[in-house]
Image (cartoon, rainbow, N blue to C red):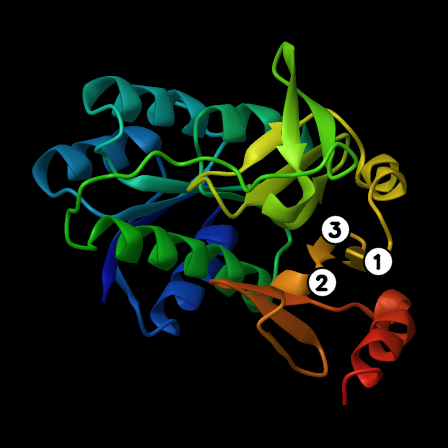
Amino acid sequence: MTLTCIAVDDEPLALELVCTFIKQTPFLQLAGRYTSALAALNHLHQQPVDLIFLDIQMPDLSGTDLARVLDKGQPGQGPRIIFTTAFNQYALEGYRLDALDYLLKPFNYAEFIRAANKALAYAELRQKPTEPNPVVTAPAAADDEYIFLKVEYQLVRVALNDILYIEGLKDYVKIHLQSAPKPILSLISLKALEEKLPAKKFMRIHRSFIVALDKIQSVTRQSVQIGAANIPVSDQYKDAFNKFINRWV
């Protein structure tokens, strides 16, 4: 599968970097590059794409404004968005706009391809043959097998065996679930959530990631695979993770 995409950024060097990363990614096809959101919007009216790599702070029309315009015009049907920005204070707003991911500048190709893989996984999921949809429920859990998390203005019960992995976003976490196509965003730090999770089931393998140990599908020296996500193992957590892996080797 190939995803058509455009890159939008008013900084020439940042735009060039994103375009270079797109060109070296086999499943991405660059359909246009723009230094303004208004020019990008004109392209999208004439030629829809699958994915937009979108800067947030731009003159005339911001990236978040463009995202709102696209969502209003075709709710749930427009291109998916990966925000690229140097300012982490926009993370929550980005996820409220249903962005696939949020790349904080300066980012490298490993971070870029991780976000691009999410877009590919989403597109492949949407292309599956339509079948009658069963009622999706979280796996059953005993009383001590779930946690309550603050999501928007309510507490949501989350079964521990439904969690695939968790991303840290400063004061928030993004929790990827087995039973839901989209992650949930909760107001809690990754460190605070780590303290609530049972160590026998979950392990922090990076300053930004906690994984469910029983959901790991494959392992390399520097990463683990869970579904479509390739999650890095940082040096700080490598010793503890290797001890866990060595028990099964």
Q: Helix, strand or loop at disc 2?
A: helix
Nearer the observer, 122 or 140? 140
The quadrant in which residue 223 appears is bottom right
* Place of residue 28 in the rendered image (x, y in percent of width and height, measured from the top left): 30, 64
Query: What is the three-letter code of the residue carrying label 1?
Result: Lys
Determine crowd level at label 3: few under 14, some 14-19, many 20+ residues with C-alpha closer than 10 A: some
Q: Is residue 59 visible?
A: no
Q: Observer-nearest residue: 99 or 90?
A: 99
- The residue depicted at 24 percent of the width and 39 percent of the height is 133
How far apart marks 2 and 3 lie (CA) works out to: 16 Å
Which residue is identified by label 2? 213
Label 1 sits on residue: 200
The residues bearing labels 3 and 1 have C-alpha atoms spaced at a distance of 19 Å
Q: CA distance from mark 2 to mark 1?
A: 8 Å
List x then y, in percent, for residue 77: 21, 33
Residue 122 showing in the rendered view: yes
Element under disc 3: loop
Residue at 72%, 53% in the rendered image: 209
Q: Which residue is mark 3?
A: 208
Estimate how packed mark 2 is, as few (under 14), some (14 to 19) or many (20 or more) residues with alpha carbons within 10 Å.
Answer: some
Looking at the image, do the residues carrying marks 2 and 1 touch, with CB atoms under 8 Å apart?
Answer: yes
Assign a secondary structure to mark 1.
Answer: loop
- Earlier in the chain: of badge 2 and badge 3, it is 3
